[in-house]
């Protein structure tokens, strides 16, 4: 279990982070406009940015005292009570080579958090955000992986409810409205 790796990695904290990631992606998917040219790539970029921003705002706003940010760049690394974690969209059972890259600051911070440079060697913590065909979040999985081959040391699906995954009642959820009456009126001169 994650808390066996480090006591800071509790179910409550991992669930809070997973909810922030899911809501960021849900907002990005809801804002997608295929008519304007949005495709899977642009929605994916927006989802990454929105999710990263959700975590950053929660950390900087003091919403969760245990949440911090180690690296604000596009190699975004956040901290759960000092433990560095990164997130990616993809299959939790088959992390990509890119997912298995570790930032130098991330490795140093993990050695500090664990208090054991040998035990931290090559270890990385990830949250895998798995999605369906429409880009919606289907589940979030905490992973502890080691080395360039990504040896799985922990695989823990984060418990999330449907409201977390599908954004029920979220900012972009609204009731459907009929088209405006003016659209049904004939045009002048036409």
Image (cartoon, rainbow, N blue to C red):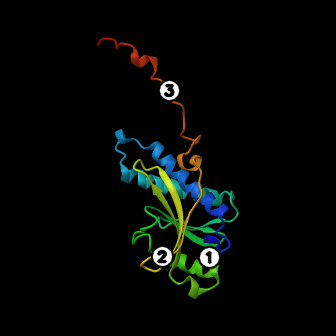
- Tell us which disc is closer to us: 2 or 1: 1
When asked about the image quadrant of residue 159, the answer is: bottom right
Extreme residue in the bottom direction: 118
Classify 10 Å Cα crowding around label 3: few (below 14), some (14-19), many (20 and above). Answer: few
Q: How many marks?
A: 3
Q: Do callouts 2 and 1 mark residues in contact (Cβ within 8 Å)?
A: no
Is the N terminus in the top left, top right, bottom left or bottom right quadrant?
bottom right
Task: Please indicate whether residue 163 sits to the left or right of residue 147 in the image.
Answer: right
Label 1 belongs to which residue?
5
Q: Is 176 left, or right, of 98 in this rendering?
A: right
Report the Cα–Cα distance between label 2 and label 1: 18 Å
Q: Which residue is mark 2?
A: 102
**Residue at left 44%, top 67%?**
93
Instruction: Report the disc number at residue 177.
Output: 3
Look at 64% across and 69% down and name the residue there.
Answer: 9
Of label 2 and label 1, which has the lower sequence position? 1
- Crowding at dot 1, Cα within 10 Å, few <14 / some 14-19 / many 20+, comes out as some
- Give the SS element for disc 3: loop
What residue is drawn where x is 61% and y is 63%? 14
């Amino acid at each position: 279990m994650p808390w066996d790796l480090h006591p800071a990695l509790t179910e409550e904290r991992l669930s809070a982070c997973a909810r922030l990631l899911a809501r960021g992606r849900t907002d990005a998917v809801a804002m997608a406009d295929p008519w304007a040219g949005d495709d899977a790539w642009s929605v994916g970029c927006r989802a990454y940015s929105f999710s990263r921003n959700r975590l950053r705002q929660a950390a900087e706003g003091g919403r969760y005292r245990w949440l911090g940010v180690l690296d604000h760049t596009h190699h975004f690394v956040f901290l759960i009570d000092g433990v560095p974690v990164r997130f990616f969209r993809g299959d939790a059972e088959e992390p990509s080579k890119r997912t298995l890259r570790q930032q130098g600051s991330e490795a140093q911070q993990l050695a500090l958090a664990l208090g054991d440079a040998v035990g931290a060697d090559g270890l990385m913590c990830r949250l895998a955000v798995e999605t369906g065909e429409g880009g919606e979040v289907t589940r979030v999985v905490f992973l502890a992986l080691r080395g360039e081959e990504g040896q799985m040391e922990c695989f823990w699906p984060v418990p999330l409810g449907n409201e977390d995954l599908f954004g029920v009642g979220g900012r972009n959820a609204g009731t459907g409205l009929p088209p405006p009456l003016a659209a049904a009126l004939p045009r002048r001169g036409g």
